Image (cartoon, grey):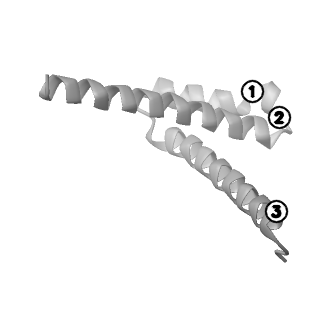
Amino acid sequence: MVDGPADTSTHCNRHETIKKKLIDICILGYLLVFGPTDTARKHVAETILTDKNQGDPDQVISQGGFYDQLFLHFCKFSLLWLDLETNP
């Protein structure tokens, strides 16, 4: 039950955290199935199954966050580069 503004803020933050974790998990799943090469898919699988991640789902989820940031920065750079090429 939400009692006031502070409770609403906490609820929203928790919702955003769960949303981010789900996105990170989806990224890992997507890369396992649709990674660009067999080597990439194997690397993602090994990253998930590594000993340091065993028993700690947050460690696995953080790997998805890493790929999320990696791809976001790559895509932003690529879009900027394409824009500079088409609009000098």
Q: Disc 3 designates what residue?
A: 6
Q: Which residue is mark 1?
A: 50
Furthest-front residue in view?
5
| Residue under the image location 76 percent in, 35 percent down | 59
Occupied quadrant, residue 68:
top right
Position of residue 42 in the picture relative to residue 52 (left or right): left
Q: Amino acid at mark 3?
A: Ala
Q: Nearer the viewer, mark 3 or mark 2?
A: 3
Q: Residue at x 75, y 57 (%)?
A: 14
19 vs 45, nearest the viewer: 19
Residue shown at 49% from the left, 27% from the top: 40
The residue to which callout 2 is attached is 54
Task: State whether residue 18 is above or below residue 75.
Answer: below
Could you say where residue 3 lies in the image, as x and y percent from the top left? 85, 75
Q: Are marks 2 and 1 in contact (CB under 8 Å)?
A: yes
Question: Of the residues shown, which amino acid type is indicated by label 1?
Answer: Thr
Q: Residue at x 21, y 30 (%)?
A: 83
Is residue 61 depicted above or below 87 in this figure? below
SS for callout 1: loop
The local secondary structure at tag 2 comes to loop
